[in-house]
C-alpha cells in the first residue's frame, strides 16, 4: 500500500490499531456506516469518516436536521464501519477493513459540533465546496449543523483485497475497553422522515447493478453487532438479488440485511447512493430478498443540476433546524468558516 505524496505520511496511532489500517482510517472519503433499528434491522449508508479528536475513536457525523442515524446509535450503540471504497483516498491497494464498535452520540454542544464539521469537511473534500461563495456557505446552516457519532472500536477484520479470497487478519481491543455514554436524548417529538421512499424497489434494480460500482451487504452477527462486506458480483433474482461474496467472511450472512450501492468521483463533487432493506440467506452465494428501497439523497448530474438538487433539499430541511436545536435546548448554530 502506498500513499499519495500530497497526503499525510505519519499518523499517530495511540489506540494501538493495526498499523496497515490507520492510513485508510485517516484518508478514506467514504465508509459504510451501519446502525440498527429497534427491530434489529441493519441500515447501511455511505458517510464521510474522520479520526476522532482523542485518537481512540473513528467518527462520522449526521445532520442535525436528519438525526435518525444518531438516534439509532443512541438507542443501540452496536455499530459497524466498512472501509471498502478507496476512491479519492490517494491510497493504492489499501486493505478492506471491517470495524465493529460502540457508538457515542454527541449533541450537547451543537456549535462546537458544527465548527468541527465545517473545518474538517472543507479540509477533507475541498473540491465539494470550491467556487461556492462564502456568503452562500454561511447560509447552509441546515447542512453544516451536525451531530457527531464517535465509534470506539472493539474488533476489526481486514483483508488484502475486496475479493476476500484470503483469511482476514483480526484485531481485538484490550480487555475492559468501553465507550463513554451518549449525550442524553433530546425531548419532544422526533422529526418525521423528510423524503418519501420509492413505492417499488424493482424499478431501481437494473440501474444500480449497471451504474453503481460499490456494493456492500450488511447483516447482524451472533454477538449482535452488524457485519458488512463487499459484494463481488450479483444477478437479478425474482425476489431481489443473488449475490456472490468472498469465501472468507466473519460469519455466514443470515436474517435482516441491508444492501447498499454507491458511487462518487475521486474529488467527491457528487455522489449517488441507494440502500435496499430485506433479508439474506445463504453462504458465499446468498439471496437477498428485498422488501423496500430507502429514499436516497444523491447528488447527480452536472454542476447546475447538483446545485439545484442540493438547494431543493435545503428548502425541505431548513425549517427543521430551529426545531431540532430547540429540542436540545440550544440556539441554532452558525457557520463559522475557516479564515484561510
Image: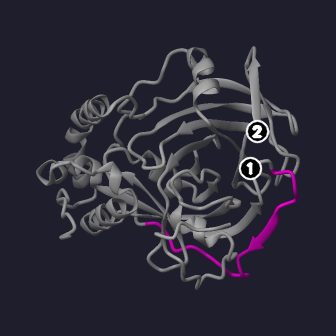
Is residue 338 found left or right of 177 in the rendered image?
left
Q: Please provide percent x and percent y for residue 97.
A: 69, 60
Residue that label 1 marks: 162
Q: Residue at x 69, y 72 (%)?
A: 20
- Look at the image and tell me whether residue 37 can be seen: no
Q: Earlier in the sequence, mark 2 or mark 1?
A: 1
Give the alpha-carbon distance from disc 2 to disc 1, as whole Å: 8 Å
Residue of label 2: 232
Q: Which residues are magenta?
A: 164-182
Q: Helix, strand, or loop for circle 2?
A: loop
> Of residues 240 and 42, which is closer to you in this image?
240
Q: Is residue 180 magenta?
A: yes
Tell me if 47 is positioned left or right of 161 in this view. left
Where is residue 43 shown, x and y percent of the image?
58, 42
In the foreground, 181 or 21: 21
User: Is residue 184 located in the magenta-colored stretch of the structure?
Assistant: no
Answer with left or right where residue 91 lies relative to residue 176.
left
Amino acid at each position: 500500500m502506498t500513499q499519495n505524496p500530497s497526503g499525510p505520511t505519519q499518523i499517530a496511532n495511540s489506540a494501538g490499531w493495526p498499523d496497515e489500517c490507520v492510513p485508510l482510517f485517516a484518508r478514506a472519503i467514504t465508509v459504510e456506516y451501519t446502525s440498527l433499528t429497534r427491530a434489529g434491522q441493519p441500515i447501511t449508508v455511505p458517510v464521510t469518516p474522520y479520526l476522532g479528536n482523542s485518537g481512540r475513536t473513528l467518527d462520522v457525523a449526521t445532520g442535525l436536521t436528519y438525526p435518525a442515524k444518531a438516534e439509532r446509535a443512541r438507542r443501540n450503540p452496536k455499530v459497524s464501519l466498512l472501509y471498502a471504497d478507496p476512491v479519492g483516498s490517494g491510497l493504492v491497494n489499501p486493505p478492506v477493513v471491517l470495524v465493529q464498535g460502540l457508538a457515542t452520540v454527541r449533541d450537547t454542544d451543537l456549535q462546537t459540533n458544527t465548527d468541527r464539521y465545517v473545518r474538517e469537511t472543507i479540509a477533507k473534500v475541498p473540491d465539494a465546496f470550491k467556487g461556492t461563495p462564502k456568503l452562500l456557505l454561511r447560509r447552509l446552516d441546515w447542512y453544516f449543523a451536525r451531530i457527531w457519532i464517535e465509534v470506539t472500536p472493539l474488533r476489526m477484520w481486514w483483508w488484502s483485497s475486496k475479493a476476500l479470497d484470503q483469511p482476514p487478519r483480526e484485531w481485538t481491543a484490550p480487555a475492559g475497553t468501553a465507550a463513554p455514554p451518549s449525550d442524553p436524548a433530546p425531548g419532544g417529538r422526533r422529526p418525521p422522515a423528510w423524503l418519501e421512499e420509492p413505492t417499488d424497489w424493482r424499478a431501481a434494480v437494473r440501474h444500480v447493478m449497471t451504474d453503481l460500482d460499490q456494493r456492500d451487504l450488511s447483516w447482524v452477527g451472533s454477538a449482535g453487532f452488524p457485519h458488512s462486506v463487499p459484494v463481488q458480483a450479483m444477478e437479478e433474482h425474482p425476489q431481489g438479488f443473488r449475490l456472490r461474496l468472498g469465501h472468507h467472511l466473519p460469519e455466514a450472512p443470515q436474517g435482516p440485511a441491508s444492501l447498499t450501492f454507491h458511487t462518487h468521483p475521486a474529488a467527491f463533487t457528487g455522489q449517488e447512493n441507494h440502500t435496499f432493506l430485506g433479508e439474506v440467506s445463504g453462504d458465499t452465494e446468498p439471496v437477498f430478498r428485498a422488501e423496500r428501497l430507502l429514499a436516497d439523497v444523491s447528488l447527480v448530474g452536472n454542476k447546475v443540476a447538483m446545485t439545484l438538487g442540493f438547494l431543493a433539499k435545503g428548502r425541505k430541511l431548513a425549517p427543521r433546524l430551529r426545531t431540532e436545536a430547540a429540542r436540545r435546548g440550544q440556539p441554532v448554530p452558525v457557520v463559522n468558516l475557516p479564515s484561510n
